[in-house]
Amino acid sequence: MKTPEIITKAELLKHWQGHRSLTRRVIEAFPEQDLFEFSIGGMRSFAHLAQELISIAGPGLQGIVNRVEEPYEEKIDLRTKKEILEQWDKTTDAVDVYFNKIKEEDFHDSFNLFGQYNSPVYDNILYFIDNEIHHRGQGYVYLRALNIEPPYFWER
C-alpha cells in the first residue's frame, strides 16, 4: 500500500514556480540603477541576490539529477536588468526540465549539494525555495525603502 502524500511532486514544482514568478516580479519592480546599487546596512544589492538565486537553482537541480557534487560558484556576471530577467527565465525553464527528471523514489535519497550540504533531495529543494523567499524578503525591504510598492506576496 502506498503511503498517502501530503503534497505531490507536481504540486511542489507548481509551488516553487509560483515563488519564482513572484521573485521575477520583484526584480521587474526595481529601477535599473537601484537594482544594482541600492542596499541597506551593507547587504548585497538585489541584482547580486538574484544572481545568487540563478546560480543555485538550475545548477543545483542539474547536480542532483546528474549526481555531480561540484562546489557552488556564482559564475555569472549580469550587468543589466534585462540580462537578469532573461537568465531568470532560462533558469525557470531549467527548473522545470531538471525537476521533472528526478524520480519520486529519489526524493528521500541523500545528495551532497555543491559538495557541502548532505541531505535528502527534497531537503535540498526546500532549501532552494527557502533561500529564494529569504532573499525576496530583502528585496521587499529595499523596494519599501525606495517607496515602491512590492508585489503582493500571496500572488504566486
Image (spheres, grey):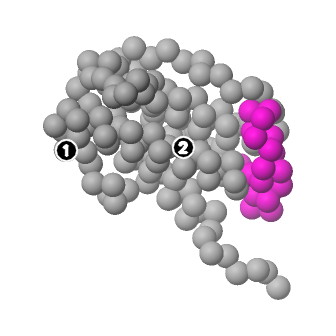
Q: Is residue 65 magenta?
A: no
- The amino acid beneath tag 1 is Glu
Residue 123 shows in the view: yes
Pointer 2 and pointer 1: residues touching (CB < 8 Å)?
Answer: no
Mark 1 Cα within 10 Å, few/some/many (few <14, many 20+)? few
Image quarter of the C terminus: bottom left
Question: Splitting the image into 4 quarters, where does residue 81 fall?
Answer: top left
Residue 84 shows in the view: no
Residue at left offset 69%, top offset 53%: 123
- Image location (x, y in percent) of residue 8: 62, 68
Which of these two is toward me, 59 or 40?
40
- The amino acid beneath tag 2 is Asn
Tell me the magenta residue range. 101-121
Image quarter of the N terminus: bottom right
Q: Is residue 63 above or below residue 127?
A: above
Q: Which type of secondary structure does the marked residue at label 2 adopt?
A: helix
Residue at left offset 74%, top offset 51%: 121
Q: Which residue is mark 1?
A: 149
Which of these two is toward me, 80 or 128?
128
Q: Is residue 111 magenta?
A: yes
Mark 2 Cα within 10 Å, few/some/many (few <14, many 20+)? some
Q: Which residue is mark 2?
A: 131
Q: Is residue 53 above or below residue 81?
A: below
Residue at left offset 67%, top offset 37%: 60
Total tally of numbered discs in the picture: 2
Q: For this view, does 70 lie left or right of residue 53?
A: right
Q: Which type of secondary structure does the marked residue at label 1 adopt?
A: loop
Question: Splitting the image into 4 quarters, where does residue 65 fall?
Answer: top right
Residue at left offset 78%, top offset 50%: 119
Can you tell which mark lies on residue 99?
none
